[in-house]
Image (cartoon, rainbow, N blue to C red):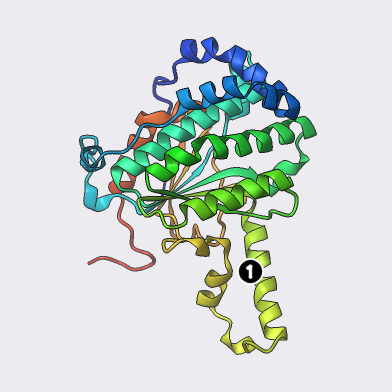
Amino acid sequence: MMSLRVPAPSSFNLQRFNEKRWRLGRDCFLSFSPSCVENRTGLIAVRAAKSEMTAFTAAEEETLPEGLQPELMPKHVAVIMDGNGRWAKNQGLQPWDGHRAGVEALREIVELCGKWGIQVLTVFAFSTDNWIRPKIEIDFLLSLFERTLKSELETLAKNNVRISIIGDSSKLPKSLLKVINEVEEVTKNNTRLQLIVAVGYSGKYDVLQACRGIAQRVKDGEIDVEEIDEELIEQELETNVTVFPYPDLLIRTSGELRVSNFLLWQLAYTELFFAQELWPDFGRNGFVEALMSFQQRQRRFGGRKS
């Protein structure tokens, strides 16, 4: 079942965002100038500190918005964070401004998941299909991802958030791979929320790499062809990093009505929610409405309730 809704009034503070715009332009410059990052670490540290999510508390974790039932909350939510570029264009800003606003929007959703008892949040950050975008945009996106991981690591670790990165890492910069390895190692024992970030990922790629892995095992004599079943394929998919590999709810923003090559195997029985808002405008109200829609559905998984 899927749901489509019209946009609610935006909760994004455009005035506050524009006040920070000079920093966004500077960020784009710094992203391609490593020496400048080293010379201006004080300014970057200030920016990261101002953007930190707040610490979760036990009281906040138990508090749900009116109308949401804790026993009906999804264990795993997946999000296609679509519309950063269009949001920036609509505001007369540059594409990287939209991506920075998208990071702020993600920070809010991560915080809400931690407070409301959602156990896994998977976000589609960069698709294998995105490699055809202009190189300057790709370089900025990957640099922004690397700097965000660095700046948020301490706060996420304190808040008991585990970070997992899935996707084809063969094209990622070595500096980013080093940071990914660090954050996964530092947070691997955290248990409150697992944040899975799909980078260089696609659903087709995931199935393909799973098939190759199984084929290699058959070739090596570890298993017989007759032993190949759904369970074996699922063990080889990249979502094997979590005990809840199948999203209960998929949210896509920006009004597009497709899953865009995301988690194709894993979405077999996922409830779909399509929001008209662009990702930077989605926010708390949009997330609550998506969760409310999810809780009103009957999930039968192919069966029939009498």
The residue singled out by tag 1 in the image is: 210
Q: Position of residue 98 (x, y in %)?
A: 59, 25
Task: Answer left or right for 218 relative to 272.
Answer: right
Residue at 54% across / 25% down in the picture? 45
Residue 203 in view here: yes
Decide: is 147 above or below 211.
above
Residue in the picture at 57% in, 50% down: 182
The part of the image, by quadrant, that contains residue 25 is top right
Q: Is residue 4 visible?
A: no
- Is 194 left or right of 213, judged from the image as shown? left
Residue 152, placed above or below residue 74:
above
User: Above or below — where is 181 with respect to 46?
Assistant: below
Residue 91 picture location, percent across and down: 58, 15
At which x and y percent is residue 258? 56, 45
Q: Is residue 78 above or below residue 266?
A: above
Point out residue 278 in the picture as x, y percentages from the top left corner: 52, 28
Identify the secondary structure beneath mark 1. helix
Quadrant containing the C terminus is bottom left
